[in-house]
Amino acid sequence: MQQSALEMRNQTLIDRGNVHVATTYGRTPIALVRGEGMRVWDADGKMYYDFLAGLGVNNLGHCHPKVVEAIRQQAGTLLHVSNLYHIQPQIELADMLAALSFADRSFFCNSGTESCEAAIKLARKYSHDHFGAGRYEVITFENSFHGRTMGSLSATAQYKYHKGFEPLLDGFQYAPFDDLQALERMITPKTCAIMVEPVQGEGGVNVPSPGYLKGLRQLCDARQLLLIYDEVQCGIGRTGTLFAYEHEGVPPDIMTLAKSLAGGVPIGALLAREEVAKSFVPGTHAATFGGNPLATAAGVAALKAIQEDGMLENCQRVGAYFMRRLKDLQQRYAFIKEVRGRGLMLGIQLDFPGGQLVNDCLERGFLVNCTMDTVLRFLPPLVVTESEVDLLVATLDELFAKV
Ligand SMILES: Cc1ncc(COP(=O)(O)O)c(C=O)c1O
């Protein structure tokens, strides 16, 4: 008889996984089998406080009851139908996104990279429709991350992800982040769009200077370029507002979402204002599973829960507290070069690689992550409390004291 995952132990699952699962990930040697709110459990029954939230997917916490209930109901009603037909929860989610953002229309897909692919295609198509062929280049930024499929990978300005997959796609230029003058010098008659993460995630939790998005908007307007925000990681409440661009009040023409949009169910979305969205006419872009009833019903429930359950307020309050506590640590440890971030998207810049600290945190029951080798990154669910932050900070303090 097959053992259920709950009956198996970590090592059994690790050994089995090592046989047939693809070797694309450097995995931590535990198997997570259950989650609730801020907490997850491994197959040996050990509990962890999840300060990573599935890399920014579980913004509502694990198994949010309203999302679980919506999935249950939808699963028993209609799991999938083709986009050849109208889909009720998809319509509802698009309505909600239009009411909550700058956008008039949403195209749904299944992941962040797909949403960025769609954004690149829409920018090219719009430019082709309005300015003719030959104007197709997208400028992205150093240390950006837009995904792993060939278009998004080519948009990602980090060589370590490109290595071995060259040649990349034509049509991307990389500018320094947070430097409007350098960007302006790179715009050519071939440029059609500028694509930016309002807060860079994988690139090390980098928040641009105040006024940067406004500067990008002005530049795009002056040069008739489209402004694309990639809010796959910083969107859906992560920075304390539903969308990170709201901090500066500067809307884009196109925006990408994914990760936590459906509370843990795979989804991606491309949002655009009407004039731009119109360039996607029937037949120009598609995804079989995109906007599927299950994913969009979860999305509707997740977006409602974020608003009804006061998660944005909690994110702002606990995020500010967390930042203060990390800055206190910075006062005491000279190897902390910077504490940065916004809301509950926070990073500690160390002056040495942080991998060992991630392992030490794991051992003590905390899931955290390190990006760019030296940035400890924290992306907890938006329901995290001050006392849970205190527990992590006390553990970091103890570990830092031993460095
Ligand atoms: C800003 C940003 N864009 C795109 C992606 C790609 O998303 P996915 O892994 O769902 O394809 C990520 C993933 O981390 C991301 O952080």
Image (cartoon, rainbow, N blue to C red):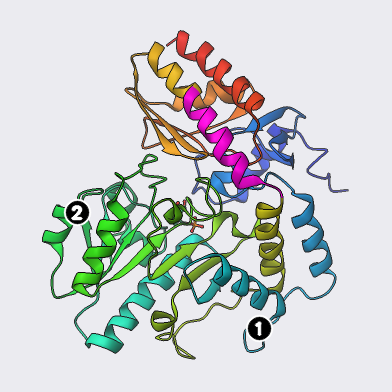
Task: Return the residue at label 2.
Answer: 180
Helix, strand or loop for the magenta stretch, by majority: helix
Residue type (three-letter) at the residue carrying disc 2: Leu
Q: Is residue 321 left or right of residue 162?
A: right
Q: Residue at x 67, y 74 (%)?
A: 92
The residue sitting at 36% across, 71% down in the picture is 120
Per the model, the C-alpha gap separating discs 1 and 2 is: 43 Å
Quarter-of-image position of residue 76: bottom right
Region in magenta? 309-324
Visible residue check, residue 18: no
Q: Is residue 355 above or below residue 266?
A: above
Number of numbered discs visible in the structure rendering: 2
- Label 1 neighbourhood size at 10 Å, few (<14), some (14-19), many (20+)? some
Q: Position of residue 383 (x, y in %)?
A: 66, 40
Q: Quick one: 218 or 94, which is closer to the camera? A: 218
As for residue 196 lying within the magenta part, the answer is no
Query: Circle 1 sits on which residue?
Result: 82
> In the image, is the residue at mark 1 within 8 Å of ligand 1 by its beta carbon?
no
Q: Position of residue 134 (x, y in %)?
A: 19, 82
Position of residue 163 relative to residue 107, above or below, is: above
Q: Amino acid at mark 1?
A: Ser
Q: Is residue 67 left or right of residue 312?
A: right
Quadrant of residue 336 in the image?
top left
